[in-house]
Image (tube, rainbow, N blue to C red):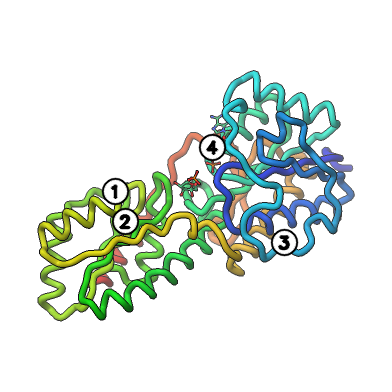
Amino acid sequence: MTSVKSIAVLTSGGDSQGMNAALRAVVRSGLFHGLEVYGVQRGYQGLLNDDLRPMDLRSVGDIIQRGGTILQTARCKEFMTPEGQQRGADVLRARGIDGLVVIGGDGSYQGANKLSKLGIKTMGLPGTIDNDIPFTDVTIGFDTAVSIVVDAINKIRDTMSSHERSSIVEVMGRHCGDIALYAGLASGAETILVPEVQFDLNEVAERMKTNFANGKRHSIIVVAEGAAKGDDVSKQITEISGIEARVTVLGHIQRGGTPTAADRILAGRLGDFAVRQLIAGNSGKACGVIKGELTTTDIDVVTNTKKAFDTDMYDLALRLSQ
Ligand code: ADP
Ligand code: F6P
């Protein structure tokens, strides 16, 4: 006895590496459990356009290693309105679809929450490079994005050392500093600027001068886009310290490319889990992993909670960067 017979899955908002792996897991797990599974093209926009197609085992072949999302994604203004949300629910009902898995970030979760309140059985999977979703230790795509940033910083560090320069690397994350924090920690950055922690560029510049006087050959400043613009940081740091600086804005390369093994495994576990939760009769939940364990939290709670910043990790990065 399952409480759902037919489910749909969509990817929404900014894409992330591992969305395809999550989609594959939802489809294959759904089919394994005897459900009909539909893929919605272009997120909520596709839902409003009734752009759904049945998925079979082969529709998700050869995608586990691919970045992006084969279902495409979109940002849909119309779905932000109550009328749009009602229409989305009606489209699903008209097709006899009783469950929906939404793979996306906090905005997409808000949409899933609205559908859930309209009686659609929903499950959210955290698909975003930003790692800004609470009630999960990590989001799908975050590990890959951090690895891309670390790889870039390794290369930048080589040339900055040769020229005894300072380098400012601006990374994504929207309002969240996690990409900057974890990439900064992993790449030995001297300074990590995040929106969650106040900073003083005078202090940063003075510290840099001391470090150079003590024999450092380069200085890496990782700045989260939510904290400041790399160009502004560069101007001020050079003005105060007199040390030459160069800015690299990594941009969308952080969101593409093949997902790491960790992201693929996370996506596989979460995708299968979401389907099993729907079958078990749960709905209106966001799925996550906390201390290695798969968890569900009311999506209403998730969307109304701000993710806590890991200040211990931030302090560690500072201690190790002297
Ligand atoms: P992400 O999911 O990556 O955070 P967005 O914030 O752009 O990306 O949200 C993706 C889509 O989710 C939006 O284009 C919109 O269709 C839907 N959405 C966002 N916020 C809401 C909301 N408050 N109510 C209903 N739908 C929303
Ligand atoms: O949410 C993912 C993200 O890549 C953010 O880190 C960034 O601020 C934003 O999306 C960029 O959005 P767009 O691709 O629309 O420029």
How packed is label 3: few (under 14 Cα within 10 Å), some, or many (20 or more)?
some
Residue at the disc numbered 4: 107
SS at circle 2: strand
Residue 289 left/right relative to 304:
right
Marks 1 and 2 sit apart, C-alpha to C-alpha, by 7 Å
Residue type pointed to by label 1: Ala
Give the mark, 1 or 4, whose residue is nearer the N terminus. Answer: 4
Residue at the disc numbered 2: 223
Which numbered dot is residue 228? 1
Residue at the disc numbered 3: 63
Picture coordinates of residue 292, whole percent (x, y): 58, 62
Q: Are discs 1 and 4 less than 8 Å apart at CB? A: no
Give the mark, 1 or 2, whose residue is nearer the N terminus. Answer: 2
Marks 1 and 4 sit apart, C-alpha to C-alpha, by 23 Å
Of tags 4 and 3, the one toward the viewer is 3
Which numbered dot is residue 80? none
Of tags 2 and 4, the one toward the viewer is 2
